[in-house]
Amino acid sequence: MTLTHGIAVGWLSPSLRLLGSDESPLGDPLTITQASWVGSLIGLGSLTGNIIFGLLLDRLGRKVCMYFLAIPNMIYWILIYSAQDVTYLYAGRFLAGMSGGGCYVVLPIFIAEIADNSVRGALSSMAMMYVSIGMMVGFTLASYLSYKLMPCIIVALPVVFILAIIGLSETPQYLLRRGRDDQAEKSFYFYKNLTPPTSSDKEASKHDAAKIEFDTFRLQVLSGGVTESISWRDFINVPTLKIFGLIFVLIICNQLSGSFAIFNYTSHIFAELGNNLDPNTSTIVVGAAQLVGIFSAVVLVDRLGRRVLLLTSMGGMGLGELSIALLKCFASEEFLNQNGWLPLLIMCLVVSIASLGVIALIFIIIIELLPAKIRSIGTSLSMATFSGFIFVALKIYPTMIYDQGLAATMFMSAGMCLFGFIVLGLFLPETKGKLMTH
């Protein structure tokens, strides 16, 4: 599902060139204003998806919400195929955003609740890895396939997703929260790959290793207060406010450090630094560097821990952005023309080290920081804030680059990395191995 969302995001860039030309499949070419709305409505959809799925998660359950994730995405591809005018694209992009916003709330919680501590970080990081792969796939397919053919192929992916999750159980935490202990026990054995007690003798089954493990897990879950109703006091207390403060710093540093905006304005940054390579080729190389970074995060996150990777990523990204700013300030035009490969190399380093922690780990750190009782609502609020800052970052960056210049924009981004490095270095706890029952 995250792969499909990535493809939906990646579809836009090559398709806008076609939609804005005289050969537009809609008849009239898109205006600049229409194109900007087609681009930005995915952000508003994402914000809506964060809130709606956050509210439904504890009411309907993780698995039912996962089925619902696929529906807006399917409608998106159908609307692109059948588009008669730009309003079809507006509706489709909003729905694609809704599906993606839901993915960022539902899937990380589902994964965190079913995964063993030893692989939870890697599995959660894979969600972002598949979004990145999807963006590259979407960019490539939209560049080489016809406008009508691509939706016919990709619409099959959400259908495959629905079929693939039919055999999965609801998470044991959710079932215990609802008082469905027998189903929770079966689900626990399913995800832990344990053999349920077979003995009909009650005394013997009490001493079965799998039964003992489930009973311990059940007590841990229930001691976290998940069956009690949530009140405002669960949010307004010193430990929880400290957690939300750390999450807020994590989100603003993630976005205002340029981790997302840089990808959207890569070609403009290359133009400013005198890179003579083809913009599409450069974008694909930078996309590959992002994948290297995220794949490294998947491999290392459960070995080194979240904190080390995040701080290394934030520090390295800040130094890389500082290099771009200094290059723009002090390198002569002649030097940049002779060393056209240098901006591409620096951008690849910035993107790969940003992907190693700042991009790959934000979801798993947020979920592991939040207490179990308010995890669903807390994740929804965090992701809604995250979507809001994506919108802010995408709005600020082009204006800053054009008005203040690339160097000033990169100095600001490096400053945000330094701020995040200091605050999170001082206050962020290591969450590797944390029990998901608390």
Image (cartoon, helix red, strand yellow):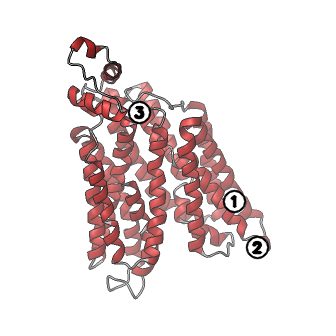
Percent position of residue 368, x then y = 44, 34
- Mark 2 — residue? 333
Q: At numbered mark 1, what does the secondary structure look like: helix, strand or loop?
A: helix
Q: Could you tell me residue 24's position as x and y percent?
A: 37, 84
Closer mark to the observer between disc 1 and disc 3: 3
Query: In the image, residue 262 lies at what x, y percent?
Result: 56, 60
Label 2 crowding class (10 Å Cα cut-off): few <14, some 14-19, many 20+? few
Q: The residue under label 3 is which amino acid type?
A: Leu
Q: Viewed as shown, does residue 383 lie left or right of 413?
A: left
Name the residue rendered at 40%, 36% in the picture.
115
- Quadrant containing the C terminus is top left
Residue beneath label 3, please? Answer: 370
Q: Earlier in the sequence, mark 1 or mark 2?
A: 1
Specify which label sits upstream in the sequence, 1 or 3: 1
Mark 1 vs mark 3, CA separation in Å: 37 Å
Residue drawn at the location 41% of the way across and 52% of the way down: 388
